[in-house]
Image: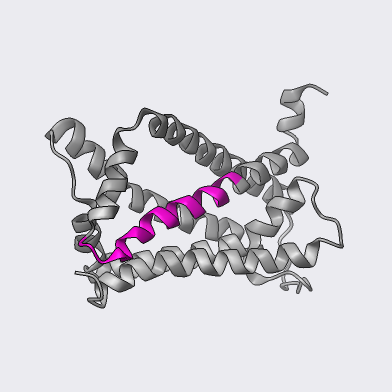
Amino acid sequence: MTWKQTLTSPVGRKFVMGFTGLFLIAFLIVHAGLNATIFMNDDGATFNAVAGFMSHNWIMRILELGLFIGFAFHIAQGMMLWKMNRAARPVKYSMKRYIPKIKWYSRYMGLLGTLVLLYLVMHLAHFWVHTKDELYFGGSEVNLYERMRDIFTQPLWFVLYMVGLASLLFHLLHGFQSAFQSLGMNDKAWTPLVKKAGVAYSVIIVVLFALMPIAFMAGWLQ
């Protein structure tokens, strides 16, 4: 079997999903940590300094490209696996069958993945696209701290971000453990630990991200 055949097989696609999933899990840790500098109570000075460094450093540009490639592979493989799973179950039953020991969010990963993708598009449009547009076409730096405050204090965007983060939470609750399983790390001795680590990671990351819009909307940050 060639590499192409291997990577396009169901097992190969799950491996790519797992590998890119762990890569994105690591990215979220870094992203949350850098964004958390808004809580330093210095009117966004530290946050803007970090954002400026990320925007101009060529190493960051290369890593950014790798990040987009990782997202692209993860999304593409997820869509292909969803289609393959649908094709494998063409018969619709008149009665819904209860599948024991499977969380509801594991059965709706297609929907959750779509919601997370829409959330990602919205997030990129608000911050990444807007920043690049101002920097390269407007000739001016964007005060991202003020940009965050402007976005997160608008009720519509606040609600949409909360919905997006809720979708991300359930996506991670399934995806964390699934990523390890897809890479063959499914030893029974480690499974309980991976499950607990997945829950802890998912909750901490999402709560940290959620605190950012909440802090602006509640007036904790000005």
- Is residue 27 on the magenta stretch? yes
Q: Quadrant of residue 70?
A: top right
Instruction: Give x and y (percent) for residue 142.
Output: 18, 45
Direction from residue 190 to residue 16 in the image, left or right: left
Quarter that holds the C terminus: bottom left
Which segment did they paint magenta? 23-43
Of 8 and 45, which appears nearest the observer?
45
Instruction: Give x and y (percent) for residue 127.
Output: 28, 49
Residue 87, can we see it?
yes
Q: Quadrant of residue 196?
A: bottom right
Q: Is residue 191 above or below residue 138?
A: below
Of 196 and 36, which appears nearest the observer?
36
Of 57 and 109, which appears nearest the observer?
57
Direction from residue 47 to residue 75 in the image, left or right: right
Residue 118, can we see it?
no
Residue lying furthest right: 188
Tally of numbered tags: 0
Direction from residue 117 to residue 190 in the image, left or right: right
Name the residue rendered at 74%, 57% in the picture: 91
Question: Magenta: predominant secondary structure element?
Answer: helix
Q: Is residue 34 above or below residue 98?
A: above
Direction from residue 33 to residue 217 in the image, left or right: left
- Is residue 180 on the magenta stretch? no
Name the residue rendered at 46%, 70% in the picture: 207
